[in-house]
Amino acid sequence: MAIADDHDEYAKLVRGMNPPRVVIDNDASDDATVIRVDSVNSHGTLLAVVQVIADLNLVIRKAYFSSDGNWFMDVFNVTDRDGRKILDKPTISYIQTTLEAEDCYYPEVRNTVGIVPSEEYTSIELTGTDRPGLLSEVCAVLAGMQCAVRSAELWTHNTRVAAVVQVTDAATKPSGGGAIEDDARIADISRRLGNLLRGQSGVRAAEAAASLTHKERRLHQMMFEDRDYGAAGRPDPRTEVSVTHCAERGYTVVVVRCRDRPKLLFDTVCTITDMGYVVHHGTVSTEHGNGAYQEYYIRHVDGHPVSSDAERRRVVECLEAAVERRTADGLELEVRTDDRAGLLSDITRIFRENGLTIRRAEISSEGGEAVDTFYLSDPQGHPMEPKTIETIRAQIGEATLRVKNNPFVDDGGSSSDVAAGSTAFLFGNLFKFYRPFQSFGLIKLY
């Protein structure tokens, strides 16, 4: 124990003498903002930086990173979603302040300030096998138990599903929210969700540390633990992952080629990090035709490269899954309206009654406004007819709906708004693959 304490004190001394240095430069590149970060290297440093950029919905056009001993240096060329430089002063200040803060890289520092997320909300984790309408049924149970959904995110991949749902207590704290504190009520929620899952699930309390984990990273971890990768999967032919040995340097070289999309670097680095590997060097760039190229030189945390064919296959399969979990080849529909009790239950019920399958969902509620984004397809992945959209619009009522890249309107591929009473539409592509739902396999509350 004394040795461990000595190591901790030495690590703190090194960090104190070498705080992170961040430079944000809008002159170094003609078409992107350049972010340079130098810091003491530790396992997860690269992921921490990429996570900050991804959470701001910035697009990484090009990047390279390298670690020399205990020092880490990385450079990112970033833009906003419209391809413009980052000129907004509050955003630049936030990036600078966050990346220079010690708790960005060392979460144990942040955890000592006494902020306990479970006092603000109760988190529910669900993983298992998908079936149509299951999210609607889960939302109905939560609404019936007077649980207000504060935020939620759901991913599906290879017949599996993972969801993190944060709820507040609408029964005893209808105005201020807060976590559900009654143990008996939590047990009742677990029992009802267990009944909903037809007895094919395990119900247990999650560790409190899970609530401190970044939500999207937690979804990757949950799907990894649920083994959504491997032989059961059907990787997109446009996704290519190779893993080779670099004998002269003692590294394993990982190359990923796939369609480019937002947060791609976060997804791959997150998976590499959580599998216990360290990225020592790497480069990321975009390719012609909306392609992405990523090259990593990695070793295991124990300093050894990938050593067997089985381990190599596992790295390939897990990175293929990481790329595809967030792929949104579907109709992207955003619902923006005043929040109210049971809203999410009503919206998901309308989708279910119209034969739509939710492939991915991002739910948020703040300041009395609900902003919910759904990626939808029919169960067979066939193109959705315009009349289905009109039916949904009429049933949802006084809300703003937004769908991107209308396949039924020839506008040259650009986004457009089509006024329809109080509703605006932008239509999008449809999911191409059918992943039938059967059941959730795990429920966690914490």
Image (spheres, helix red, strand yellow):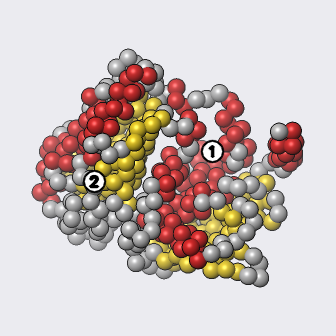
The three-letter amino acid code for the residue at tag 1 is Tyr
Q: Which sits in the foreground, 327 or 338?
A: 327
Image coordinates of residue 114 in percent, x first then y, are 65, 27
* Quadrant location of the N terminus in the rendered image: top right
Is residue 352 shown left or right of residue 337? Answer: left
At a point 73% along the width and 43% down the height, the residue shown is: 102
Q: Residue lying furthest top in this view?
A: 172
Image coordinates of residue 140 in percent, x first then y, are 25, 35
Q: Hey, which quadrant is residue 380 in on the image? A: bottom left
Q: Residue lying furthest bottom in this view?
A: 248
At a point 69% along the width and 32% down the height, the residue shown is: 112
Evaluate whether residue 52 shows in this view.
Answer: yes
Is residue 56 shown left or right of residue 239? Answer: right
Q: Which mark is residue 366?
A: none
Proximity of marks 2 and 1: CB atoms separated by less than 8 Å: no
At a point 15% along the width and 60% down the height, the residue shown is: 386
Q: Mark 2: few, some, or many residues within 10 Å (few <14, many ≥20)?
A: some
Is residue 438 shown left or right of residue 155? Answer: left
**Mark 2 / mark 1, whichever is N-terminal:** 1
Q: Secondary structure at mark 2?
A: strand
* Residue holding disc 2: 438
Q: Secondary structure at mark 1?
A: helix
The three-letter amino acid code for the residue at tag 2 is Gln
Q: In the displayed structure, would residue 337 be above or below residue 381? A: above
Q: Which sits in the foreground, 177 or 146?
A: 146
* Residue holding disc 1: 94
